[in-house]
Amino acid sequence: MNVFVAGGSGFVGRALCHVLAARGHDVTAASRSPDRAALPDDVATVALDVTDDGVGGAVEGHDVVANLVALPAHVRPARSHETVHAGGTRRLVAAAERTGVERFVQVSALGVAADIDTAYFRAKRRAERAVRAAAPESVVYRPSVVFGDGCAFVPFLERAVPPVVLPLPAGAGRLHPMWVGDLAPMLADGVVGPGHTGKTYRLGGPEVLTFAETVRRVAGDRVVVPVPGAVAAAGAAVADAVPGVPVGRDQHRALRHDNVAAPNDVSAFGVAVDDLLTLEAYVDGR
């Protein structure tokens, strides 16, 4: 099949391109600044900004469009979540419908169904609704936080953790970290495999961790100190005004909610939860 991967040079996008190419599909990786060196030799590349109106010409002639364009949830990006996630997705799915693309695959985020009031989740909710409205038989994935080489999540934790003590909002939610090497084949199944149209998949890794446990997996034997929610919120508000500080108000709000796949739909892809890579095993193997 001819597959167009928007965000194909990104962290998850390039992993998907590797899997699809290995399975013999014709793949085009699209991104604002394509990274040829990070992709297999037989994957074509094209420069594409999904916030521009002229995306139709890029997707025309493909059987499938997979949208993996993403800004990290746990950092404050230079571009707007609303512009990229919501606006970009609307343009992309409209172009796919207009040019006769057979299947649209949207990589959303676990937590969009919850009432998490952050710019990231608001935009992701709008994007998913736009996809379902324009192309009801699309395949939607909602992974929890994804880790692996080149991810944003592990560096975020490393930057957010001081040398000795991390003040953590009391009652912080739980996470369900998933390795990109486990996620990418499941995405590929939805892109080119039968039986997935119209489905929404919630995906997580082999273990549910508190945020404190997640920090310890990544940053070692740190002392994690829970602080009252009001104090943590006030600190996050101050951090919003400080350039280079990775945790602001939106990140504080997001971290107070569970980000857990319940149920975990990995079994829909013939995978047992116990066979997935843990965050600790990944960090130990780096």
Image (spheres, grey):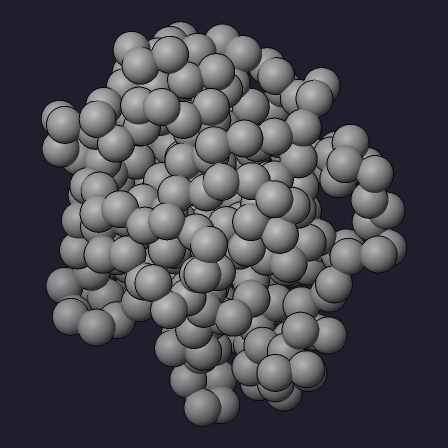
Q: Can residue 247 be seen in this view?
A: no
Which residue is pictured at 31% across the width and 23% down the height? Answer: 60
> Which quadrant of the figure contains the N terminus?
top right
Extreme-bottom residue of the structure: 163
Q: Measured from the top left, where is residue 164 in percent x and y?
A: 49, 90
Q: Which of 65 and 203 is in front in this view?
A: 65
> Which quadrant of the figure contains the C terminus?
bottom right
Question: For this view, does 267 lie left or right of residue 105?
Answer: right
Q: Measured from the top left, where is residue 57 in percent x and y?
A: 21, 26
Total numbered labels: 0
Q: Which of 212 and 124 is in front in this view?
A: 124
Question: For this view, does 93 lie left or right of residue 262?
Answer: left
Which residue is pictured at 71% across the width and 19% down the height? Answer: 195
* Residue 269 against residue 31 in the figure, above or below: above
Q: Measured from the top left, where is residue 90 in percent x and y?
A: 28, 22
Q: Can residue 24 be seen in this view?
A: yes
Question: For this view, does 53 lie left or right of residue 184?
Answer: left
Which residue is pictured at 67% across the width and 28% down the height? Answer: 193
Q: Which of 104 and 244 is in front in this view?
A: 104
* Residue 123 against residue 98 in the figure, above or below: below
* Residue 66 against residue 284 in the figure, above or below: above
Q: Measured from the top left, where is residue 280 in percent x and y?
A: 70, 74
* Residue 60 against residue 166 in the figure, above or below: above
Question: For this view, does 177 lie left or right of residue 61?
Answer: right
Image quadrant where residue 25 sits: top right
Image quadrant where residue 76 sits: bottom left
